[in-house]
Image: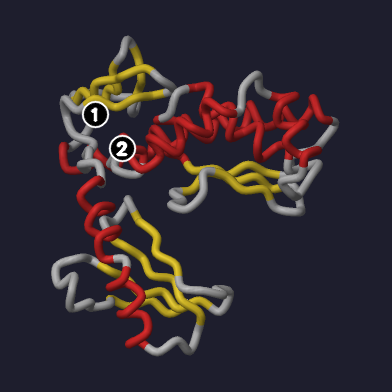
Amino acid sequence: MTVRPLRVPDLPDAPIELRESPRATRLTLRVDAARDVIRVVVPRGVPEAEIVRFVTRHADWVRARLAAMPPRLPFADGAVVPVLGRDHVIRHEADRRGGTRRAEGEIRVGGRPEFLARRVRDHLAAEARREVAVRSRDKAALLGARVAAVTVRDTRSRWGSCAANGRLSYSWRLILSPEWVLDYVVAHEVAHLREMNHSRRFWRLVEELVPDIDAPRAWLKAHGALLLRYG
């Protein structure tokens, strides 16, 4: 995939990134909330003048999306971070030994202050890995399916994925969502172990694993961009 900045005269200050993809069949606009960028995905061979006209037609949408983007929420001493639906305050304890620890509504971090953000991120990613691994295998057992492996990444376009070989992958940022939202995403990916589609049978499997699918889907649609702003 070819990636480069795109300048649009009607949007001189907007951060726009052009992504030429061999898999794309039409021009699309997307928001990369993790990087404050509007992405234009285009098929190969589309002239730049046509791309600029396409973005110009959607200039109001671009401005509105950039204006609506939540503020960044850095991991810093005193910052509040939600973990499975409960707010935690980051506390820097320079002389702390034994690594980062979550207790009594706090995330306690030792070491030098310039490494605090990375240590908080690593801690949350490890917590996410434990949560989704246990839940994935428990739910797979209910369906008589097998999980080959579970990984977490910092994905931007999807919260989870399931490969045909049984490998499941999740965004570590799900640990920042309420527990019932994380649980739904796990159920969604585990159901793909049996049905690699979004058929009625697939959704019936998801509903066997979680009591509600509408509320967590609505929550992710409303608040998903905020999860990408942490750290």
Residue 187 is drawn in which quadrant? top right
Residue 93: x and y in percent read: 19, 24
Q: Could you tell me residue 223's position as x and y percent? A: 38, 35
The residue nearer to you, when weighing 59 against 215, is: 59
Q: Is residue 136 visible?
A: yes
Which numbered disc, 1 or 2, marks the residue that appears first in the sequence? 1
Q: Which mark is residue 110?
A: 1
Above/below status of 103 relative to 24: above
Determine the residue positioned at 32% across, 10% down.
Answer: 104
Residues 31 and 110: in front is: 31
Using the image, determine if residue 104 lies above or below residue 175: above
Q: Are marks 1 and 2 in contact (CB under 8 Å)?
A: yes
> Of the residues shown, which amino acid type is indicated by label 2?
Arg
Locate the C terminus and report the quarter of the image it occupies.
Answer: top left
**Residue at horizontal 51 percent and vertical 79 percent from the top:** 43
Residue at the far top in the pictured view:
104
Left or right placement of residue 176 versus residue 151 in this view:
left
Q: Is residue 181 left or right of residue 102?
A: right
Q: Amino acid at mark 1?
A: Gly
**What is the secondary structure assignment of the residue under circle 2?**
helix
Camera-nearest label, 1 or 2: 2
The residue depicted at 25 percent of the width and 60 percent of the height is 60
Residue depicted at x 32% and y 72%: 55
- Disc 1 is placed on an element classified as loop
Instruction: Report the Cα–Cα distance between label 1 and label 2.
Output: 9 Å
Q: Which residue is mark 2?
A: 119
